Amino acid sequence: MSTDRRPIGCFDSGVGGLTVVRRLLELLPRESVQYFGDTARLPYGSKTRPTIIQFSIENTRWLVEQDVKAVVVACNTSTALALDAIRRKFDLPIIGVIEPGARAAARITRSGRVGVIATRATVGSRAYSHAIKKVSKKIEVFERSCPLFVPLAEEGWLEHPAALEVAREYLSPLKRHQVDTLVMGCTHYPLLRGVIQQVMGPGVKLIDSGEEAAGEAHRVLEMEGLLAPRGAVARHEFALSDVPGRFTEVGSRFLGQTLRKVRRVTHEDGAWRI
Ligand code: DGL
């Protein structure tokens, strides 16, 4: 069986995509990751489709230039609005986070009432509702945007009383709808898993779309003969379009390892350059 030592490319608007990287590394410890966080242009979730498509294509192009073997779109907003456009443009496996998360929700719900929390752009696209209903038309899906979760996660205010207050406000309609399963449909949100679970209560199953996407990445790499060979030593690199104060601290805490190689890229003529 063929193997490939090149890194997997992952991008997000900021620190959130590291929740996907963490799951990828747990599942595939031999794989190297080239990460891009578009911290200069975050948040994506309040932007329009053409902008999100343009940013997502630029990010993917940069990863492809770094010679990645596949791209994991570690951002629900980019997946919801730009996955098809990216797939049309680039000739390598591109893995999104929505279909895997939607399939897991459909599999896990018992009551047939599923909540989805995501950015405004993702909720507006109805991508999760469509993907869940593709599995079962009977499932009722209640979507809610939680835009303030993104700056809270970027700031590292993960257990702060303000985070709990915001979570109470955002999640109360979903509690009223009595969902038994809640998809964290933004890669930033698993950073706030503690407060989200606290507000929803222990009976509600939280789905981490990144965890499901890591499983999908594994399947795709295996099928395409792209897994790293036995004995390969993983080397990770992180690139940001701006250097926000807390990225390294929050990211390291979350990944469980110090983010060492954090590079800064700049934007020139519609493309990212080192
Ligand atoms: N983490 C991203 C997502 O999964 C987007 C956050 C943002 O930039 O608004 O949707």
Image (cartoon, rainbow, N blue to C red):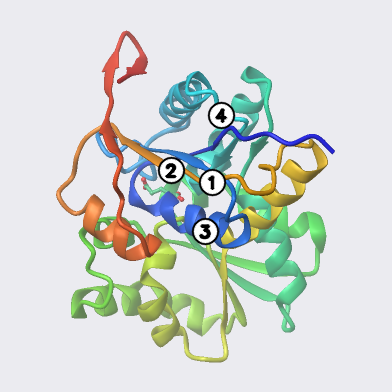
The amino acid pointed to by label 2 is: His
User: Is the Cβ of the residue at disc 2 closer than 8 Å to that at disc 3?
Assistant: no
Q: Pick whichever, 210 or 31, lies toward us.
A: 31
Nearer mark to the viewer, of 1 and 3: 1
- Percent coordinates x, y for residue 64 in the rendering: 53, 22
- Distance CA(mark 2)–CA(mark 1): 10 Å
Residue bearing the label numbered 2: 236
Distance (Cα) linking label 2 and label 3: 25 Å
Q: Are marks 3 and 4 in contact (CB under 8 Å)?
A: no
Work out how far the residue at label 3 is from the one at label 4, CA to CA, in angstroms.
25 Å
Q: Is residue 27 above or below residue 200?
A: above
Q: Is residue 64 visible?
A: yes
Residue placed farthest to the top in the image? 269
| Secondary structure at numbered mark 4 | loop
| Image quadrant where residue 11 sits | top left
Give residue 136's position: percent from left, percent from top.
81, 63
Considering the numbered disc 2 on the image, is that residue within a helix, a strand or a loop? loop
Tell me if mark 2 has few (under 14), some (14-19) or many (20+) residues whose alpha carbon lies within 10 angstroms of its own. some
Give how far apart the Cα atoms at labels 1 and 4 are.
16 Å
The CA distance from mark 4 to mark 2 is 12 Å
- Mark 3, residue position: 185
Using the image, determine if residue 268 lies above or below residue 231. Answer: above
Provide the residue designation for mark 1.
Answer: 233
State which quarter of the image contains the N terminus. top right
Kindly identify the amino acid type of the residue bearing the numbered disc 3. Gly
The answer for how far apart the CA atoms under marks 1 and 3 are is 31 Å
